[in-house]
Structures are given as structure tokens and as C-alpha cells.
């Protein structure tokens, strides 16, 4: 059986592919620069928060900040789905696994924080 770190790598690889495909669909249909500023801002907040998680969790060892950051990632993932829906149902559906995964990750992050 694969190690958990390999599994996480595979899952994130698939999720990033789905995220990129979703963005590509929206870009093809309407052009990202033709979407409202709020749409792009939510994507930006999601991306920065997603990247910041490892920094908080592993470099700074701040489990509290990592858990809150994870919550921001999950919340913005759900918002992205809702904001993408008017442009493409398919693009929105492609983001559902990301929202589920980040919601589960938020649960894990808060559980780890509580245990420590």
C-alpha cells in the first residue's frame, strides 16, 4: 500500500487538475477578465490561503493558524463553486471534490489542534 504522503500527493495532483480545468472552462466561456472582481478575489484568497497552510502547519508549527487557514480554504472553495455556477455547471461540479477535501482537511486540522 502507498504511504499517506504519496496518497496526499496524488489527491492534490488530481484536485489541482480539476481546479485548473474549471478555471479553463470559465476562461473559455467568458474570459476571466470578464468576470466580476469578486470572482477573481475569491480565487486569489483561496489560492493564497491554500499555499499558506503548509507554512503555518509545518514551518511555523502554528496548528491554530493552520486550522483557521484551512477553514478559509474550505469556505472559499464553496464560494468558488457558487460563483462559478453562472458561467458553467460543469466547471462548478469539477470543484466539488476540492470543497469536500478541504472541508475534511479543516476537520482534521482542528482535530489536530485540539489534541495538541
Image: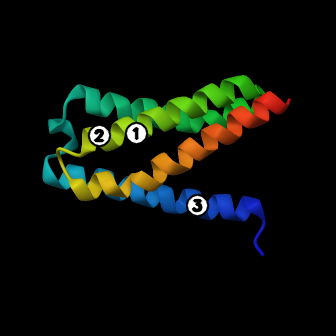
Q: Residue furthest bottom?
A: 1
Q: Does dot 2 land on a helix, a strand or a loop?
A: helix
Q: Is residue 35 left or right of residue 13?
A: left
Which of the two discs, 2 and 3, labels the residue nearer the N terminus? 3
**Residue 78's disc number:** 1
Q: At which x and y percent is residue 109?
A: 69, 36
User: Are the two marked residues, 2 and 1, in contact with CB atoms closer than 8 angstroms?
Assistant: yes
Q: At which x and y percent is residue 67?
A: 66, 30
Quadrant in the picture for residue 91: bottom left
**Residue 82's disc number:** 2
Q: Is residue 104 above or below residue 106?
A: below
Quadrant in the picture for residue 50: top right
**Residue 11's disc number:** 3
Q: Is residue 93 above or below residue 36?
A: below
Q: Is residue 50 left or right of residue 33?
A: right
State whether residue 58 appears in this view: no
Which of the two discs, 3 and 1, labels the residue nearer the N terminus? 3
Q: CA distance from mark 2 to mark 1?
A: 6 Å
Please tell me which residue is depicted at 41% across the width and 52% down the height of the picture: 96
Q: CA distance from mark 2 to mark 3?
A: 23 Å
Please tell me which residue is depicted at 64% across the width and 60% down the height of the picture: 9
Please tell me which residue is depicted at 63% across the width and 35% down the height of the picture: 53
Q: Is residue 53 left or right of residue 46?
A: right
Quadrant for the N terminus in the image: bottom right
Amino acid at each position: 500500500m502507498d504511504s499517506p504522503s504519496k496518497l496526499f500527493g496524488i489527491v492534490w495532483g488530481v484536485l489541482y487538475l480539476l481546479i485548473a480545468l474549471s478555471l479553463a472552462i470559465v476562461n473559455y466561456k467568458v474570459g476571466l477578465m470578464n468576470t466580476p472582481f469578486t470572482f477573481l478575489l475569491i480565487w486569489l484568497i483561496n489560492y493564497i490561503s491554500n499555499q499558506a497552510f503548509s507554512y503555518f502547519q509545518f514551518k511555523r508549527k502554528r496548528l491554530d493558524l493552520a486550522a483557521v487557514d484551512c477553514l478559509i480554504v474550505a469556505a472559499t472553495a464553496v464560494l468558488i463553486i457558487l460563483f462559478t455556477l453562472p458561467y458553467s455547471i460543469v466547471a462548478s461540479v469539477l470543484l466539488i471534490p476540492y470543497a469536500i477535501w478541504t472541508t475534511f482537511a479543516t476537520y482534521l486540522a482542528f482535530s489536530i489542534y485540539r489534541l495538541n
